[in-house]
Amino acid sequence: MAKKLVIVESPAKVKPIGKYLGNDYLVTSSKGHIRDLSTKGKYGLGVDIENHFQPNYVTIKGKKSVIDELKKDVKKTDFVYLATDPDREGEAISWHLYDVLGLNESNSERIVFNEITKNAVIDSLKHARKIDQNLVNSQETRRILDRIIGFRLSKLMQYKTSGSSAGRVQSVALKLIVDREREIESFQKEEYWTITAHFSEMDAELYEYNHKKLEIKNEIECNEILDHLSNAFQIESVDKKEKEKSSPTPFTTSTLQQIASSKLGMRAKKTMMIAQKLYEGIELSNETVGLITYMRTDSIRLSNDFIHDTFHYIESKYGKEYIGVVKTSKKTENVQDAHEAIRPTSIERTPESVRPYLSDDEYKLYRLIYYRALACLMHSAKTANTTVVLDNNNYQFKSTGQVIVFDGYLKVYSDYEDLTESTLPPLDSYQSNVLVSNTIEKEQHFTQPPARYTEAKLVRAMEELGIGRPSTYAKTMDTIQSRGYANLVDKKFVPTEIGIEVTDKLQEHFSHIINVKYTADMETDLDKIAEGKQVWYETLEKFYHDFDPALKDAFDKMEKKEPEKTGESCPNCGNPLVVRKGRYGTFVACSNYPECKYVKSEPKEVVEICNCPNCNGKIVEKKSKKGKVFYGCNNYPTCKTAYWDQPTGEKCPECGSMLITKKNKIKCSSCDYEK
């Protein structure tokens, strides 16, 4: 019998970790969260507002059986290791397990590992610790904040607007999209012109007059300049410089989402889903192993072992001159930054070596992560940059060229960089330092409005502004779309009328809370709670002191949008029928509610399958009370013929009962006959 129990979050981790630890350990999974805030108490928040926001937790639906099995496993073993994910949410899940399973400090400890590899898992046992209550408090505060704003603001939006929800981070991100759209709508384009001289081996563009910046605003100005130009250009200067192009930093959650979007065309949600699978483990020829480290991180730190191994790999494969330096972060490290950047678990496990075991998308994302981590420890690239200034009657034209003289990290990362080479002719060979142009052309342009946000640009904006956590960006963007607040058009966010309406209403009454600064400051407060520098319930009390009066005021003063009329009258009382919102979408009901509770029933499409074998009725598709599809007679309750599997209309040649389709096979509904 195993003496020690290890509880992880994901069932996918159970097999590889169990193999690493051996028979002395029983590895099992909580299958994610086991508890959440209840929906009881004031406003259904599941927290006692008057008693320092003490939470009331309940078992998540469907998790009672999981908890019962875990309790049995605890009784069978002597010691429990809580091995949930290495972040604040993982710490909170461990605390919930600790509490629900009745553990104590003498029979349990917390372990964390940043990668699903044998060395990392075994090493984590040497650094077992107690649950960090500060991390738990930080996550708990975030959950309560999101519950209060989500529940109470969403109710306001549902009652007063066409919207269905609001959120602490979601609504600020939506405001960015709406604000950008308004910038685009109010943008006044301005005309400008450029003049370009074309030579046999290069082009040069006019940029100065008497060495002062020149702007050409219309065609008249442009033609006046052209009248002063000849086709002879004097070489004024040739400036040659060697520059270094630094290798990139390793991936954080945010930068991975951005680059995967721009270079691989992957949505943020898909990127995180694939990264999760690469982290939890891929079955190779002789082992199941996590290919990358934990993919929810703000850190660019790399482990000393990985750095050592990678430097050795670079030297042996590319040469000593390709070894670079270790990147460090300029920002203050906090608890959320305690683990590593996203990297391969082994630099020896090249993308090509594991490609047979990966899907196309898994391979593309792993390849990107692998070569980014390799590139970040390689030497900077070096380029020879040449800038030529040509003079034509006191008008200065400029041409630039760039040539890579040492590829450095580009040796492995050039597929993901937008670096092009352009060469200039050997200008030193021209006699009298004069170049003669073939043509001089003018071209009209107009200034362009700011671009709408792509997923990559919105992620970057949220990170730079400090809105939310990178691990939640994908969910935030998904929620904005699923609520009908914005659509992706040509891969760019365009707000809907509902999204604009909700944003405007929130700004009208909650501009002091639903804004970038307040949301970013709240993230700082959550960091301080995680570091033990701030009391969690005091943060909530301060927030609620601002939020609750504003909400009550909004319920009183916010103008309610009238529901859309259908043009029909209620058959019961004659009042207009209107479109209303409900838990499961829109429906048509009487505008005189609650006095009249008429709801228009939509005609249901009847899908006939075959004739009923027991009466003159038809077997039709139906749904049970729990929403499960079954097939029954339309003469119910007179005829109670019904099947869980779809009938074929044919009779069994052996017993005469109905043949049904089950798991792509045709079988008898009564006997063992199979067609």
Image (spheres, rainbow, N blue to C red):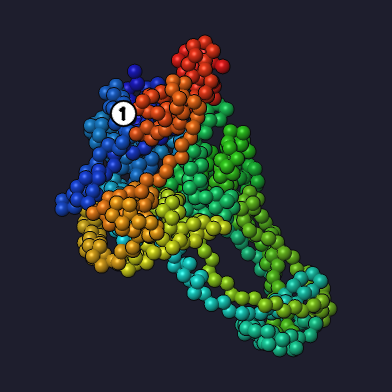
Confirm whether residue 532 shows in the render.
no
Is residue 137 in sight in this rendering?
Answer: yes
Instruction: State left or right for residue 593 relative to residue 122.
Output: left
Which of these two is toward me, 403 or 304?
403
Residue 504 vs 271, above or below: the answer is below
Depth check: 472 or 420 in front?
472
Question: Which residue does the image show at 64% across and 76% down from the upper left?
Answer: 445
Secondary element under disc 1, as helix, strand or loop, is helix
Q: Is residue 225 left or right of residue 294?
A: right
Q: Amino acid at mark 1?
A: Ser
Q: Quadrant of the C terminus?
A: top right
Percent of width and height locating residue 342: 49, 46
Residue at left 50%, top 22%?
Answer: 660
Instruction: Give the x, y percent position of residue 64.
Output: 29, 31
Q: Nearer the viewer, residue 662 or 195?
A: 662
Q: What residue is at 23 percent from the left and 65 percent from the top?
A: 556
Q: Is residue 471 above or below residue 385?
A: above
Q: Is 394 placed left or right of 91 in the picture?
A: right
The picture places residue 550, in percent across and down from the top left corner, at 25, 64
Q: Which residue is mark 1?
A: 65
Point 37% across, 67% down: residue: 504
The extreme right residue here reads 431
